[in-house]
Amino acid sequence: MINSGIQKQKSLHKKTIKIFGPPGTGKTYTLIERVLKKYLRIGIHPKDIAFISFTNKAVNTARDRALAAFPKYDTDDFQRFKTLHKYCRRYFEEEVFDPKNCMLDFALQSKIIKTSDTRLADDGFLYKDWSLGIYDKARNMMQDPKLIYKQESYKKDNLDVFLRKIDTYEHYKKDSFIDFTDMIERAIDEVDFPPLEVLILDEAQDFTPLQWSVIYKMVDKVKRVYLAGDDDQGIYKWNGADPKYFTTYFPGRSIVLRQTRRFGKEIYEFSQIIRRGIFDSVEKEYEHTEKSGTVKRYLNFNEIPFKTSEGTWYILGRVNSTVTELKMAAKDAGLYFSDNKGNKSFDTKQWNAIKAWTTLSKDKSISRDQAENMYKYIRDLKDFDFRTPKFWQNIPETQTFTFKQLKEWAGLDLEDYEQTRPWWIVLKRNFTPNQTQYFIRLLRAYGQKTIDKDPQIIIDTIHSVKGGEANNVLIYSKTNWPASFSHKTKDEQSDEKRVYYTGVTRAKNTLHILSTDYKYNYPIGSDYFVYLQEKK
């Protein structure tokens, strides 16, 4: 048995290449351009290649680039280009929870359970319930949930409540549903993965022990394995991910990508101060670019030169509560922004109503759908039928309206409203004063054409932008007490520094640090302040 294990390790080492890619060195690019395309060029069919990544974005990028370079194939040929969950899901026919109603790599959102099972009336479930998150972490770590519960330094439930919630959750889903973690667990026991020529695994540092068990099973029938990742950017240990599977436990020959194309000397040096605080980091030297760049510190949000700095922005918080603060500050400053999913800083339907009225004011016509939406925001209507979907369903989809037609026919009672009235006088229903003021500031600062485009500013958590980059990156150092550096073990402190390291290395040109006198702050350490002082 021991000899068999040794032989298996030797076999894995012989057929595996591990690619260490520090920030901006192009690990995904290397996997696609130098690995994937190499095998496609020598005649390996894409159905014999699996490309698995932690995100849909990386998977889609790999498939789209391959299709562009090899037009003889179509999308169906790349059926094994998936996230690991989707790769396993294809083997099961049971109904799976819609991702909108399920927390990926978490358990099911508890509010869904609460509304479906009356037994939970006294169980105290919360949205994105802590207990279900810890339970899912334990499953991903292949550990006893009680053990993981005891290891948590911050507990929202006592042990009895914790176990009751787990029991309730399993009872709820056992007859009809499987969740994301179920897919992985069942794949280990039930799926006979097909033989492949090549397995390519991106963001390998982010996979959990449970997910690695699937990968180990897959590689038994694979001729060549490529893993790419960066343990310093392993920021999902809160959900059970273990970078050591990539760095240490999975055998293979290692190469390091040694040239970042993202940032210059100053941002590089700053990031290395943080990286040195990751006590179990694998040593890997890489070079910065020769382009200029800088690190700046601010004590007030209003000091930051958003409107004069060129290029794109990431404004990043550690946790959702700090992201909310940043969004409020950005609105107060009249900034146009979105989150990393593309949700803009204003209500799109409200914006469409504003545009519709502006169009009417210029003696131009609007569509039926535009008119229907606009009526929801006109305050002074005597006939409220014009706000109902039933009324507009009887109007042909191709129908258009001018201001005169709406006033004469479609119930737009504007005896007191002239056509030239500004939109904020006409559109008051379902508009708060703050929303109105925000739109006015946006239009004065940016103009309609700019607001119709995607914003240059993204405000979100550090986790959400992992893998991305921006010309300017602002890091807000405030956090909340559960994530406080001072409350963490040595391992947890390193994990926090990984998050911070990942955030600052998104910057291409300028890194902006927004400091705070709040008692819980990011683990920047005294070296950071010394560094900034020496710069001056």
Image (cartoon, rainbow, N blue to C red):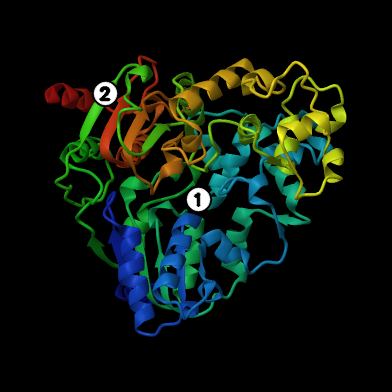
Rendered location of residue 459, percent (x, y) = 45, 33
Identified by mark 1, the residue type is Met
Is mark 2 in CB contact (under 8 Å) with mark 1? no
Q: Quadrant of residue 45?
A: bottom left
Q: Quadrant of the N terminus?
A: bottom left
Circle 2 SS class: strand
**Circle 2 crowding by C-alpha within 10 Å: few under 14, some 14–19, many from 20:** some
Rendered location of residue 506, percent (x, y) = 33, 42
Q: CA distance from mark 2 to mark 1?
A: 39 Å
Horizontal side of 47 relative to 6 (left or right) equals right
Looking at the picture, tell me which residue is in the foreground, 341 or 487.
341
- Which comes before the other along the chain, label 2 or label 1? 1
What mark, if any, has residue 141 been given in the picture?
A: 1
On screen, residue 189 above or below 383: below
Rendered location of residue 378, percent (x, y) = 73, 24
The residue mark sitting in front, 2 or 1, is 2
Q: Residue at x 75, y 54 (%)?
A: 174
On screen, residue 41 above or below 181: below
Q: Quadrant of the C terminus?
A: top left
Circle 1 SS class: helix
What mark, if any, has residue 275 been given in the picture?
A: none
Horizontal side of 51 relative to 393 (left or right) equals left
Looking at the picture, tell me which residue is in the foreground, 76 or 127.
76
Q: Residue at x 36, y 64 (%)?
A: 227
Q: Which residue is mark 2?
A: 297
Rendered location of residue 478, percent (x, y) = 40, 23
Q: Residue at x 38, y 47 (%)?
A: 468
